[in-house]
Amino acid sequence: MKISERLDTDLKVAMRARDELRLRVLRMLKSDLRYRQIELGHELSDDEVIAIVSTSAKKRREAIVEYDRGGRQDLSDGERAELAVISEYLPEQLSPEELNKLIDKAIAETGATTIKDIGNIMKVLMPEIKGRADGKAVNVSVRARLEGN
């Protein structure tokens, strides 16, 4: 089942269950997908849907950090709840070991030795990850690996 079809089904279930949080989040995701579909002018592939869902999750993570920094625990908790719903539609996240293997492979492929090569590594690495890890965390891991070399 495609992710967009799963969203439709889960939206109907949330409506029947009167689950306001889930309903609000799923409607927001459907809206984001629809805007992107109109923008591109074609039916979205699963990879495109994952990219949109990943962006939405990233926004929630950033908002959580800012709300925590500002002492707004109530808003932070709301964002965490939304992130939990959004995360259900993302692929299984990579473990640190799996991520490190992919980073090592990308470094070997590109022959990178310094921090200046991080862009080349990320170009090779990010298509393999596709929503299975946060880009910022990947960048930090690659940077740490290169500084250790």
Image (cartoon, rainbow, N blue to C red):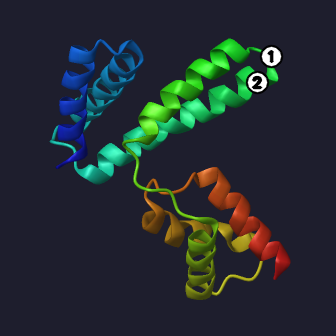
Q: Residue furthest front?
A: 17
Q: Quadrant of residue 10?
A: top left
Disc 2 on helix, strand or loop?
Answer: helix
Kind of residue at disc 1 = Gly
Disc 1 on helix, strand or loop?
Answer: loop
- Along the horizontal axis of the image, is 141 left or right of 38? right
* Mark number displayed over residue 71: 1
- Along the horizontal axis of the image, is 63 left or right of 18? right
Q: Position of residue 85 (x, y in %)?
A: 43, 32
At horizontal 25% and vertical 44% (from top left) the residue drawn is 3
- Along the horizontal axis of the image, is 40 left or right of 108? left
**Would you place residue 137 above or below residue 9 in this image?**
below
At horizontal 67% and vertical 59% (from top left) the residue drawn is 139
At horizontal 37% and vertical 16% (from top left) the residue drawn is 24
Q: How many marks?
A: 2
Q: Position of residue 132 (x, y in %)?
A: 48, 57
Which quadrant, please, contains the C terminus? bottom right
Q: Nearer the viewer, residue 65 or 117?
A: 65
Kind of residue at disc 2 = Asp
Residue on which the image places disc 2: 68
The answer to whether marks 1 and 2 mark residues whose Cβ atoms lie closer than 8 Å is: yes
Q: Quadrant of residue 11?
A: top left
Q: Nearer the viewer, residue 50 or 83?
A: 83
Between the C-alphas of marks 1 and 2, the distance is 5 Å
Q: Residue furthest right?
A: 148
Q: Position of residue 142 (x, y in %)?
A: 69, 68
